[in-house]
Amino acid sequence: MLAAMSTPALRSSPQATAVSRDRGDACPGTLRLHAADDGALARVRVPGGVLTVRQAAALADAAERLGDGDLHLTSRGNAQLRGLDDGCGGELAGLLDAAGLLPSRGHERVRNIVASPLSGLDGRGALDVRPWLTALDAALCASEAAQALSGRFLFALDDGRGDVAGLDADVTVRATADGGAQVGLGAAGEVLHVSAEEAARAALLAAETFLEAARASGARVWRVEELDLPDGELLGAVGRRLTAEGIRHQRRGRETGRTDGPPPGVVGDGLSVHVPLGRLSVRQWRELTQVAAGELRLTPWRGVVLPTPRTRADESLARLAATGLVTGPRSPWLRVGACIGRPGCAKSQADVRTDAAETLGAIGPHGLPLYWSGCERRCGHPRGDRVDVVAVPGGGYRISTAVAGEETRTTTMNDPARLAAALAEITS
């Protein structure tokens, strides 16, 4: 049996915590690469996760010519290239610029926007968020002030179904049944209701107001949750900024969000596939581009949504399944995520991806998600309830539940032969 400990469960969503960073934001981009143990890393911002087939082909070319031959999906619907040579930055930037993936070099790290990936495809949302996405990205790139945002600052555009509204973005815009939009800040319980036409502009003004408040506080902060202000003060400042800009608004209570993405399979006028551990070979990537009707939508849950004619749906799913992508709801991969681990990260204590794959047979298709981390930083771990599998120094793993309102259950497993059994027990 796994021991129940009296320590509180890990937080499933961030709470306001005063932070003052003692260094600049080192978040990687495409113009500033990160040095990893497996070579340089580039993070390509893909607002809303939306790529044209031509842009997707350019990323595949870059991964094949300059990197390790794979594309890595992030928890924000962006793409990473790994295994790059230190001297390839200029060539990489040229490839991405030619494909329209670098509309503003001064803003390339701050174009962090997630959007409901099924918006406009299945008829479930209150409205299609694509106009918001286009408008916000353009406004962001046109704002000189926005260049000061951290590479970790996140916008979320939710079509009303609540999927990305649960990701605790810094600025969340959510469509409402009355044809308007809610603009929320961090995890605050109140929002500002504006017209749908003003939603994208209101989101940018909210981000600029955050920057002003951060400067006034004298603290170096990157996220809304890190700003030490009384409850409601930042939202009030945003409201005053909206009034000054002629944007009518009302203060309202916030609707709850979820943290789950689209299930694999046919979804309305598209297909949804899950990418095990977020890693795509160039062959898989090119198969996705051949199936897609014009574009790919990368999701924050390391999946891909492809607008596809219904007449080709079954054939297309079979093609994608043959490459190793998850196309149905019963795969245990839907519950398993991991950081890059060894050999890519010097801080990692284990090759977590290999260990996750080797214990997959012990994991059923339903239950708490598992996230494997090579160290205590737990980079990329999901929001919400989960099981954390964290590598510890000297070998082995600490396995802990993180469930809101429940005591943490934890065990340390140093015997690799018993690891699968321990995972099966704690996730059952």
Image (cartoon, rainbow, N blue to C red):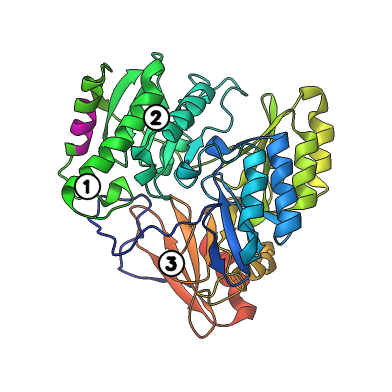
401 or 233: nearer the eye? 233
Question: Residue drawn at (21%, 38%), measured in percent from left and top?
Answer: 234
For disc 3, the marked residue is 377
Looking at the image, the residue that sits furthest to the bottom is: 394
> Looking at this view, is 60 or 230 the one in front?
60
Contact flag, marks 3 and 2 (Cβ < 8 Å): no
Quadrant for residue 211, please give it. top left
Q: Nearer the viewer, residue 336 or 404?
A: 336
Tag 1, which secondary structure?
helix
Is residue 222 positioned above or below 306 on the image?
below
Query: In the image, what residue type sits under mark 3?
Result: Arg
**Residue 333 in sight in this render:** no
**Residue 343 can be seen, yes or no:** yes
Instruction: Give amino acid for label 2.
Output: Val
Residue 260 location in percent, x, y? 52, 41
Q: Give the answer, above or below, for where 213 lies relative to 354.
A: above
Q: Residues within 10 Å of mark 3 (few under 14, many from 20)?
A: few
User: Magenta: predominant secondary structure element?
Assistant: helix
Does 193 sit left or right of 274 as displayed? left
Position of the C terminus, as image quadrant, is: bottom right
User: Magenta part of the protein: which range?
Assistant: 234-239
Find residue 392 and report its horizontal and vertical position in percent: 48, 78
Residue lying at 50% horizontally and 28% vertically, measured from the top left: 133
